[in-house]
Amino acid sequence: MLVNEQERIEIAASFIEELETKAQHHTLADRVDDPSLENAYLVQEAFIDIMVGRGEQIIAWKVALTSKAMQEFCGVDHPLSGAVFDSRVQPSPGHVVLGEHRHLGLECEIAVQLGSDLGAGDTPHTRESVGAAVDKCYPAFELIEDRDADYDQLNPFDSVSENAWNAGVVLGSPFVTWQDLDLVNTPTVLEVNGEVLGSGQTGDALGHPFEAVAWLANHLNKRGQSIRAGEFVMTGSTVITYFPQADDQVKFSVGDYGSVELACS
């Protein structure tokens, strides 16, 4: 049974209040009779409506659960999505005050910006069709707020209804010519205070960043939405999530093609 409009608004409003008060995470799934993904996206849409009503604007989207391991852990066989608001995006070198969050994590990703809309068509979007619509690609940090969640209790309803935990984005400079970048095999490196703490490859999220964009475009199209020209997509982490400490200087590099930096206080 689908949650009604009033229930969606009440659940979304309570989530916002918990974010603002930095309350410890607890499941929202017990607020509904049917904690389905459809109901979760209805709550997320209510959350987005509230934030837009406060003056926010969707500037980007994120794709979560881009590894099979995390999908199996959460009991789904596909990624999940969330929105990114303009007030939460900053250029590199970025800065974050950890005291403004309960428990902040950093994910190291490739951000893909579209030069044209990815609307619904006669056939689903693919990596190839996405590539024809891409304008720029960036090294990026995604900030996630898990509010000290119990990961053993993680479920897809919470992930989606809580907007996939997005707390912001830091964008590096766009790669000069992304067409020359191997988006599958290029090494990615996370450094904290000059020490390498993690590494991966550009294709570690769904095999290729454009696969994540194609999945998102098809997902949004089914919900009557689309990725618009100028918006960008956070395509999933290529390195294990890092939870920073005060005074950390964090850097994410994509081969020799570019990097993004963040100072934590």
Image (cartoon, grey):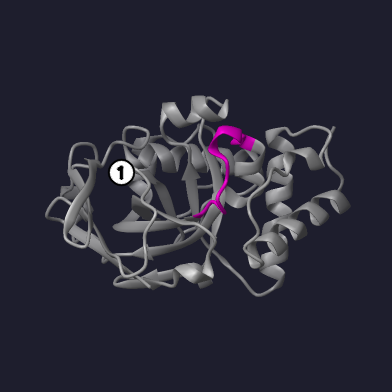
Queried whether the magenta region covers residue 154, the answer comes back as: yes
Q: Please report the residue visible at 50 percent of the width from the left and 33 percent of the height from the top.
A: 124
Residue, far left: 256
In-front residue for pair 225/248: 248
Classify 65 as above or below 22: above
Task: Assign the C terminus to one quadrant of the image.
Answer: bottom left
Residue stretch in magenta: 145-156
Q: Which residue is mark 1?
A: 239
Classify 240 as above or below 108: above
Task: Assign the N terminus to one quadrant of the image.
Answer: top right
Left or right: 160 as drawn, with respect to 92: right
In-front residue for pair 29/226: 29
Q: Horizontal and vertical percent for residue 122? A: 54, 33
Left or right: 131 as drawn, with respect to 124: left
Classify 60 as above or below 69: below
Left or right: 56 as drawn, with respect to 78: right
